[in-house]
Image (cartoon, helix red, strand yellow):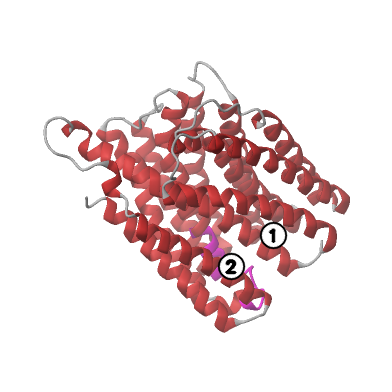
């Protein structure tokens, strides 16, 4: 299905995507400057709070917002509710994310004010999406997955606001349970369900697949929601058996999703997959392994904070970020070609879509990011500051290279 829209509309997703590239590079630089804290296990420090929020909100969330402004109309066959509202929402959100991240880094006691602005921007986005999706004539499993993701996004920001309130005004709810819920809602709820939902559209589109069933989509969604509810209960009741049960349910749901993806790819007509898309597919297997390891660790090492910290890192990076980095290299060329060349077809010579993508450099960048990610994990396990400096430095350089490669597409 075509990504075709008006030129003005395409400026909206590009606004989000290009600003997110800056946040990606800055977040990796801050992490590089603070590897000593990471090596010693001091994750809850202002500098790392700033880096994490720039990475998650400034990069991942902003990319997802930009992509959704383009993908929702394509997937749900309904126009965006209000383009003008979208540009206002972009301005509010980027100001809020910047304010929240900087305040967390330099004045955590006032982070609640930046958080309030970021929440306003996110609520505006969710309102935009709900108003758009509600116009869809025929609801399907993709509708439920994306709607479920948006609900968890709302819960994520509410929990985040309460965490910021705890920092500013004293604890009103159990901080540890609230933090765990915040991470669960955001990483496992919002990002994972959203990737599930759009994968059912993007994987067949980019692999040219037909005749697949999606038979596991509904049970995967139901089991995943059940696992999330069990885990939240476990976090607040401090019940280890419930926590293990919850992680098992998430693993089973992810396994069902993987079975659907394997079926879609098995029925593809495109034999050689583009490298960026292949990277996104590899991330699905990383996600499956991380879900399995999380279940096992919940049984064998439930109280090992370093291992849990590494699992959160791997979940966020090897599953969520790798998926985003892979899909982004496919989506941006399509958007740019549509914006710049769609109206010229048949009137003059225009480049082909494949001319905008440099596959060899993509392989090098993705390989470097994978090596740096797992190098970071090994360095943390061995408490090696030098190792972290090397591998996080590599991550920063390849994040910069990735951002430049996205920028180069826009020069063609």
Picture quadrant where residue 345 is located: top left
Write down the residue under mark 2.
374
Q: Nearer the viewer, residue 216 or 79?
A: 216
Q: Give the residue drawn at x 51%, y 38%.
A: 123
Q: From which residue to which does the magenta span run?
A: 39-54
| Sequence-first tag of 2 and 1 | 1
Specify the quadrant that holds the N terminus: top left
Q: Give the residue drawn at x 46%, y 72%.
A: 394
Query: Residue at the left extreme?
Result: 348
Q: Give the residue drawn at x 41%, y 26%.
A: 81
Q: Where is residue 404 shown, x and y percent of the image?
A: 32, 60
Magenta stretch: helix, strand or loop mostly: helix
Q: Where is residue 195 shown, x and y percent of the image?
A: 55, 41
Q: Nearer the viewer, residue 112 or 98?
A: 98
- Give yes or no for residue 43 being in the magenta stretch: yes
Q: Where is residue 235 shown, x and y percent of the image?
A: 79, 51
- Number of residues whose C-alpha sits closer than 10 Å to that of mark 2, classed few (under 14), some (14–19) or many (20 or more): some
Q: Which mark is residue 170?
A: 1
């Amino acid at each position: 299905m075509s990504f075709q829209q008006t030129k003005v509309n395409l400026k909206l997703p590009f606004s989000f995507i290009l600003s997110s590239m800056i946040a990606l590079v800055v977040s990796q630089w801050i992490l590089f400057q603070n590897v000593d804290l990471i090596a010693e296990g001091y994750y809850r420090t202002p500098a790392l709070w700033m880096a994490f929020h720039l990475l998650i909100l400034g990069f991942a969330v902003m990319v997802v917002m930009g992509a959704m402004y383009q993908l929702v109309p394509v997937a749900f066959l309904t126009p965006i509710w209000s383009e003008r509202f979208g540009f206002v929402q972009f301005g509010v959100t980027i100001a809020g994310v910047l304010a929240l991240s900087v305040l967390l880094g330099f004045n955590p006691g006032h982070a609640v004010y930046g958080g309030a602005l970021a929440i306003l921007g996110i609520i505006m986005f969710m309102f935009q999406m709900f108003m758009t999706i509600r116009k869809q004539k025929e609801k399907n499993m993709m509708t439920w997955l994306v709607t479920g993701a948006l609900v968890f996004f709302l819960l994520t920001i509410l929990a985040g606001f309460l965490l910021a309130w705890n920092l500013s005004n004293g604890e009103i709810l159990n901080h540890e349970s609230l933090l765990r819920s915040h991470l669960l809602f955001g990483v496992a709820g919002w990002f994972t369900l959203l990737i599930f939902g759009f994968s059912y559209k993007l994987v067949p589109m980019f692999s040219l697949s037909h005749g697949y069933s999606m038979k596991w989509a509904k049970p995967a969604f139901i089991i995943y929601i059940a696992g999330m509810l069990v885990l939240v209960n476990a976090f607040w009741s401090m019940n280890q058996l419930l926590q293990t049960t919850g992680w098992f349910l998430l693993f089973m749901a992810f396994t069902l999703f993987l079975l659907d993806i394997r079926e879609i790819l098995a029925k593809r007509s495109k034999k050689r997959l583009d490298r960026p898309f292949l990277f996104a597919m590899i991330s699905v297997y990383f996600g499956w392994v991380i879900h399995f390891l999380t279940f096992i660790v919940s049984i064998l090492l439930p109280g090992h904070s370093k291992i849990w910290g590494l699992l959160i890192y791997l979940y966020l990076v090897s599953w969520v970020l790798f998926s985003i980095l892979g899909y982004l290299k496919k989506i941006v060329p399509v958007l740019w070609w549509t914006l710049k060349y769609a109206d010229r077809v048949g009137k003059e010579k225009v480049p082909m879509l494949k001319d905008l993508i440099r596959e060899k450099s993509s392989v090098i960048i993705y390989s470097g990011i994978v090596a740096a990610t797992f190098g970071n994990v090994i360095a943390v396990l061995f408490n090696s500051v030098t190792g972290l400096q090397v591998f996080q430095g590599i991550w920063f350089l390849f994040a910069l290279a990735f951002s430049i490669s996205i920028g180069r597409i826009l020069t063609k």
